[in-house]
Image (spheres, rainbow, N blue to C red):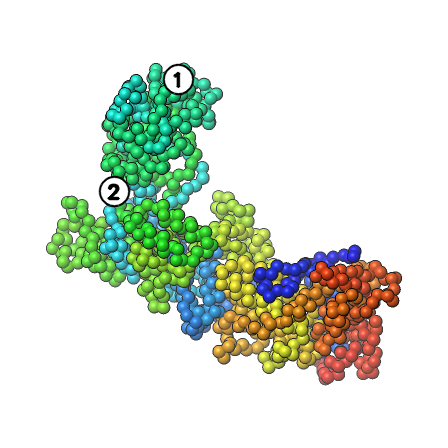
Amino acid sequence: MAVQNSSYKVILLKNCPSFRKTPPVSFLYLRKCSSSQVLSLLSLLNVRHYSTYPGPEICSSAKRRSRGPVMAAKKASEGLKKDDGKYKHTVDLPQATFGLRANSTVREPEIQKLWDEHQVFKRVVDRNDGGSFILHDGPPYANGDLHMGHALNKILKDIINRYKLLQNFKVQYVPGWDCHGLPIELKVLQSLDEVTRKELTPLKLRKKAAKFATATVKAQMASFRRYGVWGDWDHPYLTLDPEYEAAQIEVFGKMAIQGFIYRGRKPVHWSPSSRTALAEAELEYPEGHVSNSMYAIFKLVNAPNLCNLLEEFFPNLCLAIWTTTPWTIPANAAVAVNPKLQYAIVEVQSGSTDSSTLSGNAKKKLGNVFEEYEKLFLIVALDLVPTLEAKWGKKLLIKKKLLGSDLENCSYVHPIDGRDCPVVIGGDYITTESGTGLVHTAPGHGQEDYVTGLKYGLPILSPVDDDGKFTEEAAQFNGLDVLGDGNIAVIEYLDKHLSMLMVEPYKHKYPYDWRTKKPTIFRATEQWFASVEGFRNAAIDAISQVTWIPSQGEKRIIAMTSSRSDWCISRQRTWGVPIPVFYHVETKEPLMNEETIDHVKSIISQKGSDAWWYMTVEELLPDTYHDKASDYEKGTDTMDVWFDSGSSWAAVLEKRNGLSSPADLYLEGTDQHRGWFQSSLLTSVATKGRAPYSAVVTHGFVLDERGFKMSKSLGNVVDPVTIIEGGKNKVESPPYGADVLRLWASSIDYTGDVMIGHQVLRQMSDIYRKLRGTLRFLLANLHDWKVDYVVPYHELPKIDQHALFQLENVVKNIKEGYEQYQFFKIFQIIQRFVIVDLSNFYFDVAKDRLYVGGTTSFTRRSCQSVLAEHLLSLVKVVAPILPHLAEDVWQHLPFQYTNEEGQIAKFVFESRWPIIKERYLAFPVEEVNFWGKILELRTEVNKVLEVARSGKLIGSSLEAKVYLHTSDDTLAARLTEACKSETDADTLPRIFITSQVEVLPSLENEHTEDASYTGEFLIGGKDRVWIRVTRAAGSKCERCWNFSPQVGSFDEHPSLCSRCYNVVAGQPEPALAAVS
């Protein structure tokens, strides 16, 4: 049929025993409710404006629907005769002191103050008796302002904790902070002038660092609390607390006693800019790094296994290597080959270079070697010959082929210091993907090189100091910066001595110090390590016992744990927990055993780690070593901050009352698979044999709304403080409040990277306002409600039973979303049901009986019974996400709420999660199906009504009568029954918001003059229903504006219909003053 669709779409759940699992059956095009007309009457009565949908949306459909009391009020407001509106005192309008506007910058702090003054978090935890739930907080770094990543993390944790509180758990949440390490030390140093820095002793630096960290903790704590996050804020854990440091020393000691801690000289990531070793988790790999890569040659001098085969190529036979770190050539100790690869001896054809054959960019430079050598033979991987020809612009003639294994034990002359160095067999890292197939090996500057060096007993050379400059050991390069002038000097030296084939820029990923944002180097130094190899298998087994959300997190951390090298845990900094080791003054042998570690631990537990710096060696050593104290000196290394935070399970979970390990949950960003998740796992497995957590949830990074990483330089940083409090320009950056920020956190699938920006926040704010309006509608229509008025379930009209069936399914599926940590599903359910379905159907139909059905009538009380159920359930289920809104509603409840145990719930989180009511869910399937058909039918009736209104047949829907016909006898019988339901609430006129509905047994006698206001459609795709709209019969009721033939039948009230007459006749006339 040709009808005009209304502009509003609503998702209907039909036949839905599970709201989540069953997709919406259809989209219903429903007219909006008559809330706009309500405004006129409210204005007349000097009542505060109310609407489920605030703002312009109400007015957009003002002509489509009407209600009697609304239109009567409108007439009165337009100055018609005095008697019009005389029944306004009989209308039960919504009343609410609960504001439609959140006024979050004022109201949220007031609510938080209420919580604090009554210690609500502690009060609820103490009252709950359903077992313990421990979400262990990963400590943020105490070195600056919070960003959106912090906000997302803490809000997700708080949503979980608050849900568990409603589930009767004793929630144990101790917020923590990471307070040691280089970033804080650098912040302190940057704040000092040069003179003060020179006068700075370790103790003075540590005191300033502690002061900075504690001040930052205080500022960050205030921000977290403003987000609405609950926790034990009076007793947080700080890694600088003496008891924490002592527990950390204890973990270190246990690992040392078991042989998992050792000191060795091996290459580690070293930051010249920070002058300390770094762990993998302290590195980042920014895009766009360019190195000077170099092809070089080392002259072969001996081939004991290939003398006859290679004799013809001497003395001009060379090994060709490729490196992106030319500065490591002085430390070269060998060249490694892959034993399974085929190699070729190629002759470089003489002649000038054809620049047109050079692949790549113009910054390449060929070495002098090509001009000076008359004959030059190179050993390269056979598969790379064509690539190298293009790279160098030279023809390479293959003279012989041999396996990599044949080259083992050959020797070459070091191109700088003339040492004889061997050709060795390397590992699978030698491929033909790039380079020459031969790898320059410097055991002091690379992990794979180091492993190969151990196998062959190669020297571990590393002529580089803490500042990243060559030492005297590097001879002519002494004092040069290896990442700058030193690198260039090595290249120039090799070129001058005919050992450089070509140099070119090479763009690749390169490790940078995450704090200073400057490149690092691999450098062999004496460091302390945790031998991951000693418990790697146990760690991988422990991972499999943990629930990972999302599931791919398990594969990620297994891969990282399987491939990681031993953990370098020592740092050459002042601000941190000391490694409790003493060194013999002469031999430099370390002294560290169970007795010495326990003694240091006991001192630090009382005095803090500063004691290591101000106490003497004699005082720090146990009594049994006092006579030898003069033979020893204290170590100066501190522990990696990842060891600090990675010990939190021992320092917090196993030391504080009410806590225990493993925790129920860890929740952090996905980068913590190589950070806190892993460091905690390693320390716990090494000392306890198990993971410190039962489940791990990870979230992605927060990007701007275009999907770009936030940075100050791009000007796209979204500040959580600005979101909550507003920016300087309140028009461009309005204050949304913490609940809108929290609503955003619940709306996104946090398992991947997420986006936020002005447009997203405006959408969240709009949804929040609509939800608040829905809750206000519930409060406003329960203003005179008492628990004693509740109508028993079996007496409720079917429309009310159906509403409770839908509500119970919603609560059930929301609970499932919380249990699975899938908050975005909860957001979708709330948005569809509370804001759309509930407001646009049940509320729309309910307004008639709520406003004009009679104050104490059965239909109004039954509706209020359902509204009360909705209000209590909805406030509870949204409370974990929107605690301020939920508490605001709770404090405006017009009745006292007592939970299942008979306790008065003064605060929403004392109320407990809604009890599942199986009786509501037992609503018969046939009734669910019927109400699904009714809602489909309502949609189609609305379409025909819209056409009739456009054709000027009717103004409002109450001026209409609807005729229905269907050939399905069963459906026709149900529809006929619905026209004259026992309770006024279930009748089709009330559902369609028309004055009359008639079901025709046939269409034989139907006239065709109004055929333009008819239509047909299929219910459920099979039951055909015919619809016709005409003018309603009878006269208009002055009070409810329904048309009825009974209007005029009552002498005392000739302008009323029978329903309104019965309501008015039972009410006393008000005094004049009461209606002024």
State the image coordinates of residue 236 (x, y, percent, origin top left). Answer: 37, 62
Horizontal side, residue 820 vs residue 767: left or right:
left
**Quadrant where the N terminus is found in the figure:** bottom right
Give yes or no for contact between labels 1 and 2 (Cβ–Cβ under 8 Å). Answer: no
Q: Residue at x 46, y 27 (%)?
A: 360
State the image coordinates of residue 619 (x, y, percent, origin top left). Answer: 18, 57
Secondary structure found at label 2: strand
How many neighbours does mark 2 have within 10 angstroms: few (below 14), some (14-19), or many (20 or more)? Answer: some
For marks 1 and 2 on the same chain, the one whose residue lies earlier in the sequence = 2
Going by the numbered disc 2, the residue's amino acid type is Arg
Q: Which picture quadrant has residue 597?
A: bottom left
Q: Which mark is residue 265?
A: 2
Q: Residue at x 85, y 62 (%)?
A: 1010
Return the residue at label 1: 349
- For the residues marked 1 and 2, what is the alpha-carbon distance in whole angstroms? 45 Å
Secondary structure found at label 1: loop
Q: Which mark is residue 568?
A: none
Q: Can I make out residue 524 in this image? A: yes
Going by the numbered disc 1, the residue's amino acid type is Gln
Q: Residue at x 34, y 16 (%)?
A: 375
Horizontal side, residue 1033 vs residue 53: left or right:
right
Q: Can I make out residue 465 in this image? A: no
The mark lying in front, picked from 1 and 2, is 1
State the image coordinates of residue 594 (x, y, percent, origin top left). Answer: 21, 57
